Image (cartoon, grey):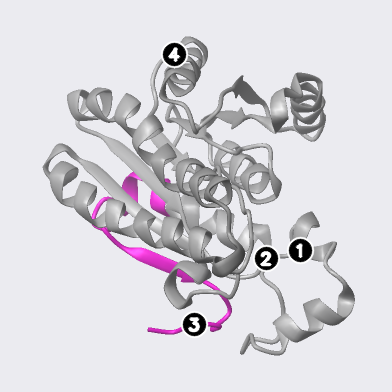
Amino acid sequence: MKNRTAFVTGGTGGIGTTICRHLVSAGVRVVAGYHSGGNHDKAKAWQKEQREAGYDVGIVFGNVREFESCKASAEAVVAQVGHVDILVNNAGVTRDAMFYKMEHEQWHDVITANLNSLYHITRLVINPMIERKHGRIINISSVNAQKGQLGQTNYSAAKAGMHGFTKALAQEVARHGITVNTVSPGYIATKMVMAVPEKVREAIIANIPVGRLGTPDEVARVVTFLAADTAGYITGSNISVNGGQHMF
């Protein structure tokens, strides 16, 4: 994977950070997208932390909800690394509420950030990939796209739509040497999940056959595998990383 380049949206988050690190370790030049509410200092501190740990990762600001902002991000990525060989659509948000209480803004924000963002970013890199006859697009979905979840009609709908996007686009671009796949993590031991009260975590783990939470490394290894040149015969697939919580 040396001399390949990658753009990881939401790259400064828990799973995103680990994906960036694994790709760098595989020899890929990586740029992480961030929004962080416009907190540029936080992103710069993150970048410094990665470099001190031995991972040279570029950063670009952008709002995946807005096409023009994504266009500026894509241009900034190209300025840093020349082109995008690997796109990891990892950015996303949750705005949980029972549907009968869900406000329009909660629905719209999640659909825009988690699903519309796939169009915004992928549309900007797909044509150059077609021209180069190579590309890897990896979309990070969720176990809740497959099984549903109380209070997450918006999130489950957006993440399920992500795999429909994957399957359709995979058919369109396969002949150009581009693969498109989905990775669907279950409950992963990120800072956000570990901040949940212990009793709640125990209830979650009780429903996971392997008896534990997943790790960001376990997700990142799958992403890195799919990103490799040697994974060219896998496309339109959804790989679950959920400890057996949902099997189909």
Give yes or no for residue 232 being in the magenta stretch. Answer: yes
Which residue has dot 2 on it?
A: 188
Nearer-N-terminus badge (4/1): 4
SS assignment at label 2: loop
Q: Are marks 2 and 1 in contact (CB under 8 Å)?
A: yes
x%, y% of residue 109? 54, 43
User: Crowding near pointer 2: few (<14 within 10 Å), some, many (20+)?
Assistant: many
Q: Amino acid at mark 1?
A: Val
Residue 230 vs residue 8: left or right? Answer: left
Residue 181 shows in the view: yes
Region of the chain picked out in magenta, as a range: 226-248
Q: Where in the figure is residue 175, as x and y percent of width and height?
A: 11, 43
Q: Could you tell me which secondary element the residue under label 4 belongs to?
A: helix
Residue ID for mark 3: 246
Marks 4/1: CA distance? Answer: 34 Å
Q: Which residue is mark 1?
A: 193
Most foreground residue, 235 or 116: 116
Q: In the displayed structure, would residue 15 be above or below residue 157?
A: above
Identify the residue at the far right of this view: 198
Q: Depth check: give the residue in front, 174 or 150.
A: 150
